[in-house]
Image: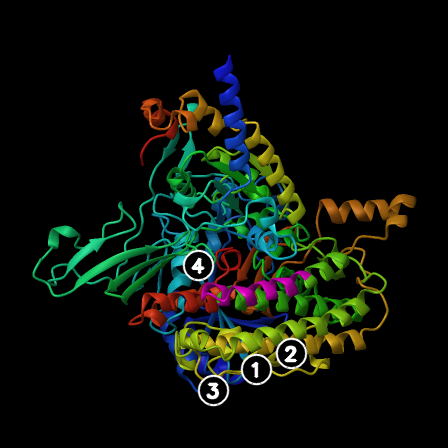
Amino acid sequence: MHFEAVTTRVHDAVNWARKFSLFQYPFVTACCGMEFMSVAGPQYDIARFGAEFPRFSPRQADLLMVVGTVVEKMAPVLHRIYEQMAEPKWVMAFGVCASSGGFYQNYSTTPGIDQVIPVDVYVPGCPPRPEQVLDGLLLLQDLIQRGATPNQQIMVERGDGDLLHIGTSRHRSPGRDKTRGEKP
Amino acid sequence: MSQAVVEALRQRLGTRLIGVHSQFGDDTVVIERGALLPACRLLREDPRLSMKMLMDLTVVDYLAWRPPLDNGSGRTEEPLHSLASGPLRGAADPRLRYRLETDRPRFEVVYHLYSPERKHRLRLKVPLADVDDGYPELDSVVSVWRGADWYEREAWDFYGIVFRGHPDLRRILLYEEFEGHPLRKDYPKERRQPLARRGGEGQVMARNPTLSTPQRAHPPGNGRRTVVLGAPDHRAPGGEAQAADDSPTELLHINMGPSHPAMHGTVRLVLTLEGETVVDADVELGYLHRGFEKEAEAATYTQVFPYTDRMNYASPMLNAIAYAHAVEKLLGLGRELPLRAQYLRVITGELSRITDHLTCDGASAMELGAFTPFLWMMKARDWIYRLLEELTGARLTYSWIRIGGVASDAPEGWTERVTETLPRIREVMGECRRVLVDHRIFRDRMEDVGAISAEDAMAFGFTGPQLRSTGVAMDVRRDHPYLVYDQLEFDVPVGTTGDCYDRFLVRLEEIDESMRIIEQALEQMPPGPILVNDPLVTLPPKPEVYDTIEGMIRHFKVVFDGIKVPPGEAYAYTESANGELGFYVVADGSGRPYKCRSRGPSFTMTQAIPHMILGRQIADIIPIFGQINYIGGEAER
């Protein structure tokens, strides 16, 4: 009982730290990139929400922002980038193209990135207004605080990434590979 | 068309010249396919013609409809309205195919040529019958215009036309696994051929795409060891098997992109390096090919506007203006547009040009480490976004241009707010100039980097700031004025060396010129209507729709059937922020375009990147790529 209370507190603290230090990897493909620039720029300034620093390597990022249309030729690339990110990791579908393909429904476009990778937050709009993106970010932060995103839950289930267990062998459970998908 | 052109062609080609006609001011010559190379050589070399530039090359697939014959034979055919707009449209109906192919070839390869000296344009068409194996052949014109290289690859990719003598004919925008040619009328619009999909239980089934191999790379067995980095599934020709350890140099293959921090835009460069020096490069695109043409063929003429807005997303308004220009040409509306609408188009277009140049120059500076000017330029860009939002309701994707005018008039006080904003932008630009123009590091990175001669630039099909930086003062707004540009005074800034620094400066100057244009246009803009009053083209005013049955019917017809554009074809050209943006629209008499091709200026310019970086260091790719201003939506459509 006592032990559980402590771990809950630790989880809260860890999640609080996580939600305010989101390092984003902007996977910018199309028009939404213009609005991504505005979100990052001085007028809207995403830095105020603890997601300041774009990391241009997926290995250093927690939040994959898929900004713009993903076409079938790009889908394997996106998948590989997602695979390269360290856990816990989150994905934001920025704009309708990333969410569902938008009004591009043809031989070339992927109907939403969730056909390829799991998504935590969908931000609609073509392109979304910067305020909408910030709203999506706050939603994601809320989910992270509650530990409610699928990736966090998977980590908890297999006892992985839990600060109390670092140093033990439990976070090297064989379940890891099952959720990571096939190696390309 | 001057008689001299026709005479010269007739002398050279004889009976292989099938027809000559002119429609909407577009001069067209139809030739037999065997006469293509002699005709092209003549058009380029003859000083009377001097067609130095291949502006566009595309194919039309006349499977579902054939244009009425009007080339002097006296025969006219009814357009197959019922077939063209009915459920058979785009479907592979064998009866249709049989009827069409008995007397008319299925494909037409269309070349748009331009002579920068004589300011003369010509459309060259080659009818091409379908063959049994489905891959008709035609001579390649790469030996005449270097810029034809990618256009022909694109035509192969989308239409399955084989260009004999092409140096490297492989798919360009799609991937090798793709089966079929999607812009043929018998390819269903939504037949996807995925490379990666999530299966059950979160598993991802991903096939790795075959990454096409650079064809011009050094042949194996030349004593050099090849090391492959970046793409483990990508094997360079020769591979490790050819290793010779005693070699003095090592060639390194490096994969840059398609998601690379310093490359805005989704392009992949496969570089062959000797130390830091680039000895070979191959550009792979198609990571943002969104099927604009297929979407446009399924949309009504008005529904195409949202797609055009998303092509060059750094300056959406200019794309919509260019597209409207083409459809208005087909409708014969060109000069009838209300004056106020023309001025509004000029003002918003030039505002968009400023945002494009701010984005391009700002991002270029940022990629070279100058982050502050980038933020300043983004600040200025946001002011323009707010102005345009006030006018159109959207920050970026406006859908505000209409066939025959614009959607809404300027709100009260808008023109004053534009006038107030311009000096603030000038101030910001002054600061940016102070920081960048004489900055030693910035100049070292930009000067003499990526220089290209005017001759080469024209052969590659350069237009816009990129061509003007080489000293060629070519600007569609001045050479072939459209809208009210002939009423406005502006200069065409040119460079001298054609390097990245010149391109950067030309863009900075053009921002000033655009502001000059806007100020004059605001002063000259008359009051009046903003849409043509043509019941077949524009929507009636709302009170009429709600109160009268005629208004209701008119509204319904225009929205559901689309604007009925009479059969014909037109190529309309405008000056977008990146160069000549042309739309080639083929109308079949229905409410939807039969073909809607866009000539995005950055597509053909990107193929010059290997030419510009050979022998240079890998770091030089960043400014070169930035200043070519490759915009995925515009280049790959």
2 or 3: tag closer to the N-terminus: 3
Count neighbours of disc 1 (C-alpha within 10 A) and say few if under 14, some if 14 to 19, many if 20 or more: many
3 or 4: tag closer to the N-terminus: 3
3 or 1: tag closer to the N-terminus: 3
Count neighbours of disc 3 (C-alpha within 10 A) and say few if under 14, some if 14 to 19, many if 20 or more: some
Q: Which residue is mark 3?
A: B48
Q: Which amino acid lies under the numbered mark 4 shown in the image of this protein?
A: Met
Q: Which amino acid lies under the numbered mark 1 shown in the image of this protein?
A: Pro
Q: Chain of mark 2?
A: B
Q: Which residue is mark 1?
A: B493
Between disc 3 and disc 4, the foreground one is 4
Quadrant of res B582: bottom right
Question: Can you name the residue that lies furthest to the right here?
Answer: B547
| Rendered view: B106 above or below B496 | above
Instruction: Tell if the residue under mark 2 belongs to the same chain as the one under mark 3.
Output: yes
Quadrant of res B261: bottom left
